[in-house]
Amino acid sequence: MPSPAHPRPTVRRRKVGSEFRRLREAAGVKSEEAAERIGGDKSKISRQENGRQGISKLEAEALLTLYGVEDQRLRTALITMAREGRRKGWWAQYGDVLPVGFQERLAIESDAVRILAFQPLLVPGLLQTREYAEVSIRGVEKKNASEDEIKVLLAVRQTRQEILKGEAAPQYVCVLDEAVIRREVGGPAVMARQLEQLIEISDPPRLTIQIIPFSQGWHAGLDGAFSVYTYPDPMDLDVVNLDYLDGALYLEEDGPVERYQLAFDEIRAAALASRQSIEVISSALQDFKKRI
């Protein structure tokens, strides 16, 4: 099974992107003008500057000229870095199965130093057992997928979870509505193993799992699931991920990101502390075990 290697390609893309953003701002060039120069749109410049999309050699040359960069050594260095940054991540080998939006999420989460996740419906993919993941893929995510596609998606999910292991693992804070651990997905045995895994991997503050109990009633997360990704470079913008039926939305502008960060703070304040949350998960686990 391939594993995300360090340094990851997106690390270099982010460094290149942040430098191109610095040069653009220093030159007083608007995103729209830069986009027009390379035949794209404002969102493409945003993706490139945040390391979510590579910059081709021709695009790099055009942008550096637009930004007035005449130092040949600097131009050569940035073009070389841009070319190396276009190397694909481990998930590229599954590109014929994975939607572009999901590949974008893998790129976003692969370099984060902190991930804040709220999920009111299902255990997040990063924490799923193989059995739970298979039920989720077959029943919700890819109902019409072939057996070969399902095998690929399970392999991707397993490899994706590697980012939570080792010294380079991001801090991961996951808040679940109690419905997640009470809703039967795949039967009592599948649920019991999934809840056992949540208990086993809980390791605050590196990996924190908290539960919002039913008794809380209304809380700030009732509008739906979301994740917030934070990066090591202070120049990198945080990213918010919102899923919907046919894809995903990524927010990077300060206003929306700050609102979701505030919402997560409110959601976490409504949740039980980590130790109490594990006790609630243990209680749900016992209920499922009785039915096996």
Image: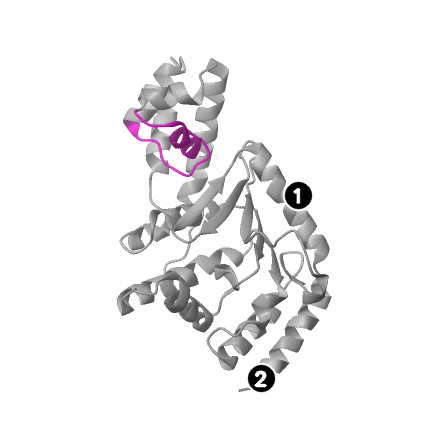
Q: Quadrant of residue 195?
A: bottom right
Q: Quadrant of residue 261?
A: top right
Identified by mark 2, the residue type is Lys
What residue is shown at x 37% (from left), y 15% (from top)?
66
What residue is shown at x 46% (from left), y 36% (from top)?
14
SS for callout 1? helix
SS for callout 2? helix
Give the mark, 2 or 1, whose residue is nearer the N terminus. 1
Label 2 packing within 10 angstroms: few (<14), some (14-19), many (20+): some
Q: Coloring scheme of the render?
A: one colour
What's the distance in space between the residues labelled 2 and 1, CA to CA?
A: 37 Å
Q: Is residue 137 left or right of residue 22?
A: left
* Residue 229: image location, x then y, percent: 54, 45
* Residue 120: image location, x then y, percent: 57, 60
- Tell me, for residue 289, which label it has, or none: 2
When the figure is inspected, residue 290 is found, relative to residue 75, above or below; the finding is below
Which residue occupies the foreground of this view, 238 or 242? 242
Q: Are marks 2 and 1 in contact (CB under 8 Å)?
A: no
Can residue 234 be seen here? Answer: no
What residue is shown at x 61% (from left), y 78% (from top)?
285
When the figure is inspected, residue 196 is found, relative to residue 153, above or below; the finding is below
Is residue 43 magenta-colored? Answer: yes
Identified by mark 1, the residue type is Leu
Can residue 143 be seen here? Answer: yes
> Which residue is labeled 1 in the image?
262
Q: Is residue 162 left or right of residue 72?
A: right
Tally of numbered discs: 2
Magenta segment: 39-57
* Residue 184: image location, x then y, percent: 52, 74
